[in-house]
Each structure stands twice: as structure tokens, then as C-alpha cells.
Amino acid sequence: MFKGQNALITGGSRGIGLAIATKLASQGASITLLARDEELLKNSLNQLPCDQNQNHSYKSFDLLSLVNSDVAIKMLKDGIESPTILINCAGITTHALLHQSNSEMIKNTIDLNLTVPIMLCQLFIKDMLRQKKLYPSILNISSVLSYTNHVIPGTSVYAASKAGLLGFTRSLSHELRGRIRVNAMLPGLVKETDMGSIVKSDLIPISLDCVATKAINILEDRSINGQSIADVIGVSPENQSLYESTIDENGTQIWHCLNDSSIILTYDQINDNYCDCPDGSDEPGTNACPKPPFKFYCANEGHFPGYIDQFKLNDGVCDYDICCDGSDEYKLGNCVNKCEEIHRQYEEYKNEQLAFIKKALEKKQKVIDSAQNKRKKLIDNLHQLKRQIPERKIQINKLKLQYENSELDQQDTSVFEGLKDHFNGLANKIEAHKRDILKQESKVSALENILEILSKNFNPNFNDPAVKDSIHKYQEYVSNKEEAILEDIHETNQMIHNLIEKAKTLSHNGAKGEDHLNYYPPTIYNLIHYYFQLFAKKFLKKPVIEYTSNLSQNELSYKIENLEKELEKIEQKIKVIKTNLSLNYGPDNILRAYDSITISKKLGGYNYRINLLDGIYQDDVFIGKFKEFKDDKLFYNNGDRCWNGPKRSATVEFICGEGPDLISVSEPEKCHYHFLLQGESWCHQITEDELKSKFKINYKLL
């Protein structure tokens, strides 16, 4: 920002001047320090950041000599390169009641604090105007005592000189009309300066760094011109711009309420302990307004800035956890600045935490590696099981084909083989029928013999009509009797024999020769297989492999059944693994590493056993079974039922710490338990903000 710029800084050997010089040098400006003590100037010059493009220098000179000597003016100008930035920081701090002050003290204070800045501006303005391309700037360091309601006894001459510097700043900026920007800064009480070390006041101490940063901001912002800029008590550096004043047509320094610009106040009404703005914006540093827009800002130099509620200001309590510099009690002044000691405690705490986190993250990585390995094994097992499925299906299909072929082989035997039992049964029936017929014939023959004897020996003269009718019918029977019954049976036997012989020559697939017996396979699969074989034999070059087996159909059926059961088990295992892989096991699947780990501890008279991925027990009482991981918590349900209550359930939360260890157990709702576990697995890289929020002051060491 300031590369190529030359900055002349009076009072640059120490305090505010040196702090501003250091910041300008760090941003590329070449610095010329102007003060009386040459030894101190040498040491200060060596502290400035410098690179090859910067040319720092110093000049030992008594600025009061400029007031009465033209020679001194010429000597000063001849020995200094024309600046593009002029910072009038040199001044005398007087702390004496006016009636106790001598004329020399009054004259020197006004000369160095007011006359010398006027003369230096007059001396270098022409040279600075020639360098307008570098946007030259003048910054006069005034004081908050110059134009505010803050009054410190014994500083009347000092305040007058600094107030005069404000008037000069406004008038000069108007004269130069922006060709050179001219501004004044009104710092508060800076403890590292002469004024800060000797004056006791209700002013909030501010740091050199804060003042130097503000100066750099003014020099950088080319829109700021003719302003008298003071740090407002209780306002953070980033919000100080909201409290910049303007000059009205009467030359009065004014400011308006932040949320209502129609309400205009004089600048000294800010922090006058009276609430003038409805939004409370005019009292950032007091508790006069009930709801100010910002909290009170504590600079806490050497530690971290803090923000405290205004109602805690000047209440007699040192809120060191927020305002370690004691600035919250600036009126009472009863709180010593403890920032150095508190920051030392913080640094020790920070180093301990960072060392622990480093080890914790190393342990966590091992847990993550274990969890990832377990997940990888599941995936490998899943792939292995998936590969087994087509193998098993091929085996099953092959066995089914063998089974079907076995049926086909049986069906391809002769028709006789298929009907053999039927033929044998028919032959046996015929033989039995033949025996029955022969037995009946024997009885009929005996009856015929009786009737033949009666027919021959019958006396026709015997008048018995029944006998006569019986003999007559017998004679008709004998006349019409068939003698070919046995021969018909023999003929039937011959036909069966011929049929058997013919059946032996026929198969299910077709007859030998011209005869053919149609057969339809019993299953669709058989039908497809049959015709595919028929097609393959006729049209395909490579023969179709026929699957045959020496096993019986019962054995094949048994093997098929076992393989199908085995396949079903594999598919069930795959389903279980897929379900497991789809579950949320936390970041990096870290909870998988705890599937076989039980955390046990006795708390509140109970023995707790926690298996994170299984369940929780309180002695012998089942608290709940693992349900899910959601929103960085573990949830458990379906535990043992409470007496006159619901089933037990639980929630487990985690924090970073040494472990795994059970820290606390509570029952926020009836039969619902809350467990807090700590362990390295739940640690992460810690930020500065987290360290600050967790840090606790050891007040015993303060």
C-alpha cells in the first residue's frame, strides 16, 4: 500500500510515533525518524522492517529550535528528503494545575504541541504538492482530551494545545482542498506513553498497536479528509468508523444516531452517561442505555479482545474472563490488568490441548483404519458370496438337466419296458380267468354226465312234466354247445404274446423301421431340451454336451435340494451384508471398530455395560438395543419395560477425550437414559475459537 512513499514522523524514537513508523515500514514505506535522542533513534531505526527497496533514516533534532531560528528551519529541511506522508506526533505531556505551571512550561507545551506541527506543514507543503500522484497526506496526533467531555485535572494547557491542533487541521484541509489530505487523530489514554504512565483517569486504556492501526487506516482511506478522529470508548476498531464526526456550518463537531440520522448530537454527547439515541448507540461505553446496538469492547492487549454487556460496566466486579484488562471497571479503576498472566495460562492450556489432539488423532486414525478394514472384509465377503451364486446355479441347473435326462433315458427304453408290469398283470389275469373257467367246466361236465344218464334212463311213460321239461332243455343245450372256449383263451394268449414282442421293438421316441409311437415330454423344460438337442444335432457344428449321471433320480433330487438350500443361505448372507453396508456407522464408518468392544463402568451405584453396536445394560436390566446413528448420536430402543412405564430407551453422545470412557448417565425423561462417552475417536483438529471457548481461567494463579 505504501511502497514508494516517504514518511517523516516526529517523535518517532518511541511511543505512538515508533508504533506508526513500524506499521508503515512493514507495508513498504521508507521512514525518516525525527527526535532529540540520537542513541534512542539508532535503536528504533534498527527495529523497523526493511527490504532492498526501502531507505530508512533518522535525524536528531530539537524541534523547539524551529520556533525562533530560521537557520534551524533551513538545517532541518536540507537534511531530510521531502516526505509524501507527514506525521506530527512529537509533543510535551504536562500534568500540572495551571496556577502551579510556569510560563516556560506553558510556552514549550504550546510550541511543541501546536506551533511546531504548523511550521513543519508550512515547510513541506510545497514539496508534497509536487507529488500529488502519490496522494500525500498529513496526520496530526491530537488527543481525546482536546474535544470531548473527558476532563483530567492538570491537563488544561495540554488540552488547549491539542484542541488548537484540531482547529489547524480543519482549516488546513479546507485550504488544500484535497490536494493533500489533512486529518487529526484523537487517541485515548495509551499506557505505554508518558501521559498514560502518569495520569489517573476514568478513560479506558488503549494499546499502542490499536492507535497505530487506526493511523494506518486513516492514511490508507483516501476518502477521509479534514476529520478529527478519536477512538470512542467501548467501540471495537472495526466499528470506530461509525462514530466518525462531521463539522456543521457553524464549525461544530457533530454526530448522528446510528439508526436515526435525523437525531443529531454534538460529538461530546457520546458516552456522556445520558441516553440520547432511542437505539442506545450514543452510549457504547456506559450503561445509560438499556439496549445499545453493540456490547462494550475490551481491547485486552496481550490477550484476545472481548465483548461484555453494558450492564456489567463499573459494577465493582472484575470480569476477567471477558475483560482481562479490567476495562469494564474503568471508572472505579479497581481491576488490575491481568491479560499477561491470563494469556500465559491460555498458552499453556493451548499447548497441552494441541499435544493431546495430536496423539488423539493418531489413535483415531488407527481406529479408522480398523473400521475401514472391517468394512473392506465385508465387501470382499460380499463379492465372494456373489461369485458363488452363478457357480451354485450352474451346478443346480446341471443336476436338474441330469435329472431330466435321467427321465428321458427311462422314457427312451422300449414300450414293453414301460408297459411290462401292465403286460404281466394282464397275463396273470388271463391265467386266473383260465383256471376259473376250467374249474367251472369240470362242474358243468359232472352235471352234464348226470343229465346224460337221466336222459338215457328216463321212462317216457312216467307222467312228470318237470322232468320231461328238464330233459328236453338239456337235449337242446347239448345240441347247441360251443366247443371253442379254450381255444379262444389260447388265441387271446397268443395275441398278448405278439403284442409284447411288438412292444419290445418300439421306443418312446419312435419305432424302428416305419412304425412310430408319439410321446410328449412331461415338462416344458424337457420339451425345450428335446427339441434343442434335435436342432443342435442337425444344424450345429459342435455337438451339444449331454449331461449324464450315474446317480439315481432320488440321489440327484437330494443333491439338488441341498444345493438350493445352500444357495438360499448365500443369498440371505448377501442381503444381511448389503443391509449392514447401507447403515450409518458415523464418519469414516468409525463405529464399526467398536462392534466387539464393551465399555464397562460403575456410576451412581450401577454397573453399566455398553456395546455401541449391540445394546446397553444397567446391571441385569436391558436398557435398549442399538437402533441407529443419527445427528452424531446413537439411539437405542426396545429395552426392558419400566415399572408402570414404557420400554427403556437411550441416547449416547460423544465428546473428545481419553477413552473410550463413560463420563455421565442421566435420565432426562422417564425410562429414557442419556449417556455421555468420551474418546479419541471423537476428536478433531481444534480451532483457535474452540480453544478460546473451552479455556477456563485458574483464578488461584492470578
Image: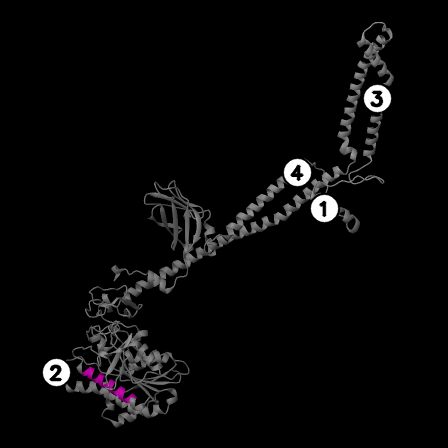
Identify the mark at residue 99; answer none if there is no mark.
2
Measure how far apart labels 1 and 2 are at the Cα level. Answer: 128 Å
Q: Give the amino acid type for the residue marked by disc 3 in the picture.
A: Ile
Confirm or deny contact between disc 4 and disc 3 (CB under 8 A).
no
Image height of 124 relative to 436, above or below: below
> Label 1 crowding class (10 Å Cα cut-off): few <14, some 14-19, many 20+?
few
Q: Nearer the viewer, residue 589 or 320?
A: 589
Measure how far apart labels 1 and 3 are at the Cα level. Answer: 52 Å
Identify the mark at residue 528; answer none if there is no mark.
1
Label 4: which secondary element: helix
Q: Mark 1 or 3 closer to N-term?
A: 3
Q: Residue at label 4?
A: 557
Name the dominant secondary structure of the magenta segment. helix
Measure how far apart labels 3 and 2 are at the Cα level. Answer: 174 Å
Q: Quadrant of residue 98?
A: bottom left
Q: Mark 3 or 2 closer to N-term?
A: 2
Q: Residue 175: where, in percent of width, then height?
A: 29, 91
Q: Give the amino acid type for the residue marked by disc 2 in the picture.
A: His
> Label 4 crowding class (10 Å Cα cut-off): few <14, some 14-19, many 20+?
some
* Picture quarter with the C terminus: bottom left
Q: Mark 4 or 3 closer to N-term?
A: 3
Q: Residue at label 3?
A: 485
Q: Residue 343: where, in percent of width, then height?
A: 30, 65
- Queried whether the magenta region covers residue 163, the answer comes back as yes
